[in-house]
Amino acid sequence: MAVVPQLPPQVPALGNAFTRGIGRGLLHILGWRLEGELPNEKKMMVALAPHTSNWDFVVAMPIIMAVGIKVSYMMKKEAFIWPLSGLFKWWGGIPLDRSASQGVVEQTVNWYNTHEAVWMAITPEGTRRKVDQYKTGFVRIAHEAGVPILTICWDFPSKSMIVDRIWTTTGDHEADAAAIREHINSHYRGAQPQLQ
């Protein structure tokens, strides 16, 4: 079975021994591992990169299950209908109202402010296609919510997802996003590195 880091006590948790066992079994079959220590923080913005393939999700889900971490994600509020609304929220879904006067950043910051523990994951490219720069929304959210950014990176040559490092925002969202992109692209390779 795959060995994965322990979930620190303050990190939002999801699942049980059975689902963690399934996740570890899938990691063993896939030959992937998670490297590094997760920080003992209640609130984090998690930037998952480099995102270049649908395989990224296939690799990430068993790791999430194996660790037993609750990872939040943004989703349009229209998807939160019965009977799936409770399930989506339990899985970490954050319902966003695109017609609201508050934008996505403001709504997500409010989510951080009104919940005790939130680890929200986002792919900063916003697409699997090649981009010249990361979108800055994740940096803006982290800055306005006062939470650090944790980079967790796919590295396909080593078949590892790596808990990379913690970033503190400076207020210069473009510069912060560019620095994170440069760091990730110089250390890690996605499934299709030509798209990084």
Image: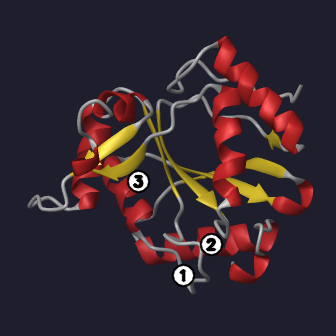
Distance, label 2 to label 3, CA atoms, is 16 Å
**Would you call the spot at circle 2 few (<14 residues within 10 Å), some (14-19), or many (20 or more)?**
some
SS assignment at label 2? helix
Position of 24 with respect to 116 (left or right) is: right
Mark closest to the chain's N terminus, 2 or 3: 3
Residue type pointed to by label 3: Ala
Choose between 45 and 144: the one closer to the eye: 45
Quadrant the C terminus occupies: bottom right
Q: Which residue is mark 2?
A: 181
Quadrant of residue 194 within the rendered picture: bottom right
Q: Mark 3 or mark 1, which is nearer to you?
A: 1
Residue type pointed to by label 2: Arg
- Looking at the picture, does residue 62 appear above or below residue 75? above
- Looking at the picture, does residue 31 appear above or below residue 171? above
Q: Which residue is mark 1?
A: 133
Task: Please tell me the numbered disc located at residue 101.
Answer: none
Q: Please say whether residue 165 is visible from this viewpoint.
A: no
Task: Please tell me the numbered disc located at residue 142.
Answer: 3
Q: Please say whether residue 157 is visible from this viewpoint.
A: yes
Q: Do the residues bearing badges 1 and 2 touch, measured as CB atoms within 8 Å? A: yes
Q: Residue furthest toward the bottom?
A: 132
**Would you call the spot at circle 3 few (<14 residues within 10 Å), some (14-19), or many (20 or more)?**
many
Position of 50 with respect to 26 (left or right) is: left
